[in-house]
Image (spheres, helix red, strand yellow):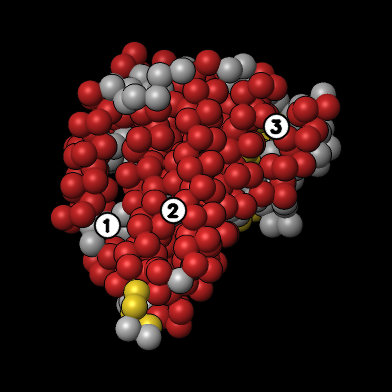
Amino acid sequence: MNFVHTEDRRMLADSLNRFVAEQYGIEQRNQLAYGAEGHSPALYAQFAELGAIGALFPEAEGGFGGSGFDISVVFEALGRGLVAEPVLGALVVGQALIAAGTEAQKRQLEDIIAGGVIAALAHDEPGSHYELNKVTATAARSATGWVLNGAKSVVAFGEKADLLLVSARTAGGMFDTAGISLFLVDGKAAGIAKRGYSRMEGGRAAELTFENVQLAEDALLGAEGQGHGVLEHVQGFALLALAAEALGAMDVAKQSTLEYLQTRKQFGVAIGSFQALQHRMADLLLEVEQVRSTVINAADAIDNAQGTQREKMLSAAKYTVGSVGTLVAEESIQMHGGIGMTWELPLAHYAKRLIMIDHQFGDEDHHLARFMALTQA
């Protein structure tokens, strides 16, 4: 495996890191992330212009990247800046369009790449626990297409989404893998009720209720009842993206903690000279490098692995970032002392994001159990 990024990827990473440092400083980021919008439409358009969204998709589909390492480069840069923009939704919905969309449906990818359309996956439901196969929302055939009913929870940027990818059951029972279908739904369609709220770490999410939402026949994405496979496919991209984002955030938290230990003095000497803190910092550095290795493995798996092997590598990465992310958050704050919890210190916001990444698309317990089940399969 080649661990060296191509020149194009290095240039993209440099451009994104420079843009984030100049335009997305922590104070401005917090104003946007914790504000009424949860992000900046203007800055999101600029991220699109820089190629942050186009890099997530292959050239054949209108992008200019699309490999696992392209995705990891983008999200690692976003993680370093705690960027609270709807890029993950663009990745997931866009990959679903590529995997299962008709030529007409795929044309919507152009607007997603350009940053003109906010896309969101609406799959999780109240009471669910990361299961891809638990779907109670229903879609029934009608004279003109489909009628959608049900509820979805914690839909990232669902309140503002222009395009929703909604899972609904067209056959089978609540936990059946077969019978799940996917639908492309206009975010402003009649019959959708939205309750938006701020997320703890910044950004927005929403609870969505669909009441007799009328959909055209061509709203169905892929084959009827075969949506579970598409969900599993796009979940893989989300797991890689979140792992890479967590790595970027960990690098910043690690570096800020190291600098604090080198400058904070007690008894006339830097506290970093204390052996106990040196041991804790060394352990932290080793754990972050372990995360870096799992992100590399996950990026390679997206490109080259298939079936069970692919899913095992991706679950391993998500489990690792969940476990190490909690450790980095806790150790960084503890080694900073009381100041580590203050709003003014960026570290507190990095810690919150690291903790919450663990709960997106399955926490560490879920993915450890999934990895074990896949190993035994």
In this picture, residue 306 sits left or right of residue 336? right
Find out whether the residues at labels 3 and 2 contact each other: C-beta distance under 8 Å: no
Q: Which residue is mark 3?
A: 180
Q: Residue at x 48, y 43 (%)?
A: 289
Mark 1 neighbour class, 10 Å CA radius: few under 14, some 14 to 19, many 20 or more: some
In this view of the protein, which residue sits in the foreground, 155 or 169?
A: 155
Q: Residue at x 29, y 72 (%)?
A: 263
Q: Residue at x 40, y 80 (%)?
A: 339
Rendered position, 230 above or below 159: above
Can residue 373 be seen here? The reply is yes
Which residue type carries mark 1? Ser
**What is the secondary structure assignment of the residue under circle 3?**
strand
Closer to the eye: label 3 or 2: 2
How far apart marks 1 and 3 lie (CA) works out to 34 Å
- Measuring from the top left, give residue 361's x and y in whole percent: 60, 45
Q: Residue at x 62, y 16 (%)?
A: 306
Position of the C terminus, as image quadrant, is top right
Say whether disc 3 or disc 2 marks the residue closer to the N-terminus: 3
In this view of the protein, which residue sits in the foreground, 24 or 107?
A: 24
Q: Which residue is mark 1?
A: 40
- Measuring from the top left, give residue 192's x and y in whole percent: 53, 53
Rendered position, 263 above or below 6: below
How far apart marks 1 and 2 lie (CA) works out to 24 Å
Q: Which residue is mark 2?
A: 250
How far apart marks 3 and 2 lie (CA) works out to 36 Å
Say whether disc 1 or disc 3 marks the residue closer to the N-terminus: 1
Q: Which mark is residue 370?
A: none
Which residue type carries mark 2? Met
Closer to the eye: label 1 or 3: 1
In this picture, residue 60 sits left or right of residue 14? right
